[in-house]
Image: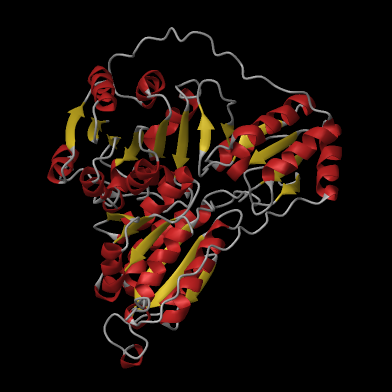
């Protein structure tokens, strides 16, 4: 007697649908309501599962993964409180337009009315950081819900698709595998927008092209340089970008200064601001008696392309409209600099990075105050990708390094990590060690929240001992070497630049992770 097909559970249909849609990596911190999904992963090969010991590691790793892989990973979070633990780094991913398929377990549909301890407004918490949110209602819909989630996550410019899965829809039979849905078309900018910006640029009035997203990659960035060279316009990226392609053989781009006073000084006299893939910029914070705009208040803002539109096509059409000639990458010439000696300063550490950064490295920058010299000094370093904290919620650096390393086997990941923000998610080191990833972590141990000391002055506050104690993380001193060793990562400390250079070169040659604590 011929047996019919074995019925699928909702969880099994979920795994099979995700794999069919090209989602083959899952960063997870599961709980009871997710056990049937975990069990399905055992029975269905093809999904790489990476355990995080804290949900902020899980969500930050998914952010770093997608920025490099160009496709979403899945997260697996436990109910509303698990989602809440991961919200800060989902906020960063949301600000980076990172595609993520965010799976959240929940109470069984019939158990929810009983108001058990973990019951919460899971969908309400997910919605502010999500481009798409849905709660599955029965096993038969889980596959189609998952396919729609992947489609939503990959829709331009990329976003978080949160699918909430009550436990009974996962364990019930009746699951159906859904076929991948087509990518949604990316809208083209209207001709009027191209023509308007072309007229502004032909006027030769002081103009800034401000770029973000895909405008910072490949041919799009080259076209932006063509436009700037042909018209005399300034060219900058947003202060914090999801991913920038940089280094020798690539066209460089300056960043909009972080501090409002510096940005306004840099852009003094600007008449026009042209946005390419970014909203109108604002200063990170408000300050008493100062503008919230980092550009002159009387400058006119123009939109060439919104984040969800085809940025590369818009820049290419603008080049054609202007007849902008091709540009070549300036020859940086031979690098005759020697490795620095002496004290660890932002400039000396930056020089080491510039000279010793591995070819095609991925740099994850959460260096905060001490790292002020790192980005400009590495313009002519070996070719690399530069990832930044995009949403201001600190604690994304180490998780992003984890995710980027999963996405880029064979490339060294260099995490430039401030010590204070590193303490938000140090558990990422354990996952990095467990996965045997090629990650070099450089911890900048100034043992204080230095950026907040500057903010005290910025808002006009007068600190006393209590205020200063709240910004001091050096009593007792953190020991990052011991912290790393305790999570399986080899580590060493440097208190001068020569030792740092030796350790950095060694770390990048050896397989697996290594942490260097710089006492700065």
Q: Is residue 30 visible?
A: no
427 is higher (above) or lower (below) than 174: above
**Residue 355 pos. (x, y %):** 39, 18
155 is higher (above) or lower (below) than 454: below
- The colour scheme used to paint the residues is secondary structure
Residue 275 quadrant = top right
Residue 40 quadrant = bottom left
Q: Quadrant of the C terminus?
A: top left
451 is higher (above) or lower (below) than 11: above
Compared across the picture, whether 4 is left or right of 199 comes to: left
Compared across the picture, whether 105 is left or right of 293 comes to: left
Compared across the picture, whether 261 is left or right of 170 comes to: right
Q: Quadrant of the N terminus?
A: bottom left
143 is higher (above) or lower (below) than 388: below
* Residue appearing at x 65%, y 54% in the figure: 308
* Residue appearing at x 43%, y 7% in the figure: 336
**Residue 340 pos. (x, y %):** 33, 14
**Residue 431 pos. (x, y %):** 24, 49
**Residue 352 pos. (x, y %):** 35, 20
Q: Is residue 404 visible?
A: yes
Callout count: 0
Given residues 385 and 353, the one toward you in this image is 385
* Residue appearing at x 38%, y 47% in the figure: 452
Given residues 451 and 462, the one toward you in this image is 451
Compared across the picture, whether 498 is left or right of 233 comes to: left
């Amino acid at each position: 007697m011929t047996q019919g097909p074995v019925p699928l559970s909702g969880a099994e249909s979920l795994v099979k649908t995700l794999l069919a849609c090209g989602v083959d990596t899952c960063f997870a911190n599961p709980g009871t309501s997710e056990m049937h999904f975990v069990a399905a992963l055992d029975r269905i090969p093809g999904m790489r599962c990476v355990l995080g010991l804290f949900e902020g590691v899980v969500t930050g790793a998914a952010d770093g993964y997608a920025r490099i892989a160009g496709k979403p990973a899945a997260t697996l979070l436990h109910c509303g409180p698990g989602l809440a633990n991961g919200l800060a780094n989902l906020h960063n991913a949301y600000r980076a337009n990172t595609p993520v398929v965010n799976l959240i377990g929940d109470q069984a549909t019939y158990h929810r009315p009983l108001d058990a301890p973990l019951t919460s407004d899971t969908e309400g918490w997910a919605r502010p950081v999500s481009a798409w949110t849905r709660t599955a209602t029965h096993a038969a819909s889980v596959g189609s819900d998952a396919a729609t989630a992947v489609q939503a996550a990959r829709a331009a410019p990329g976003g978080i698709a949160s699918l909430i899965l009550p436990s009974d829809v996962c364990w019930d039979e009746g699951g159906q595998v859904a076929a991948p849905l087509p990518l949604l078309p990316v809208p083209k900018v209207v001709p009027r927008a191209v023509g308007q910006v072309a007229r502004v640029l032909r006027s030769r009035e002081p103009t800034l092209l401000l770029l973000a997203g895909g405008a910072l990659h490949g041919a799009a960035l080259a076209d932006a340089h063509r436009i700037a060279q042909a018209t005399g316009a300034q060219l900058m990226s947003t202060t914090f970008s999801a991913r920038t392609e940089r280094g020798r053989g690539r066209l460089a781009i300056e960043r909009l200064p972080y501090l409002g006073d510096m940005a306004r000084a840099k852009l003094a006299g600007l008449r026009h601001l042209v946005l390419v893939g970014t909203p109108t910029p604002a200063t990170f914070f408000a300050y008493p008696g100062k503008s919230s705009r980092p550009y002159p208040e009387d400058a006119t803002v123009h939109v060439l392309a919104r984040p969800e539109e085809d940025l590369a096509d818009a820049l290419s059409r603008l080049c054609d409209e202007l007849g902008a000639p091709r540009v070549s990458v300036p020859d940086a010439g031979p690098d005759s600099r020697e490795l620095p000696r002496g004290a660890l300063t932002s400039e000396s550490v930056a020089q080491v990075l510039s000279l010793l950064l591995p070819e095609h490295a991925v740099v994850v920058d959460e260096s905060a105050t001490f790292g002020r010299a790192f980005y400009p000094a590495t313009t002519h370093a070996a070719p690399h990708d530069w990832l930044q904290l995009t949403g201001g919620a600190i604690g994304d650096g180490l998780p992003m390094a984890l995710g980027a390393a999963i996405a880029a086997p064979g490339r060294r990941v260099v995490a430039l990590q401030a010590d204070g923000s590193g303490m938000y998610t140090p558990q990422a080191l354990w996952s990095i060690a467990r996965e045997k990833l090629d990650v070099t972590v450089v911890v900048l141990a100034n043992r204080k929240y230095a950026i907040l000391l500057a903010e005290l002055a910025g808002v006009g506050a007068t600190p006393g001992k209590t205020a200063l104690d709240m910004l001091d993380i050096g009593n007792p001193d953190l020991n990052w070497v011991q912290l790393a060793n305790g999570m399986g990562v080899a580590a060493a400390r440097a208190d001068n630049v020569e030792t740092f250079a030796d350790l950095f070169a060694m770390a990048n040659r050896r397989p697996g992770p290594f942490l260097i604590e710089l006492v700065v």
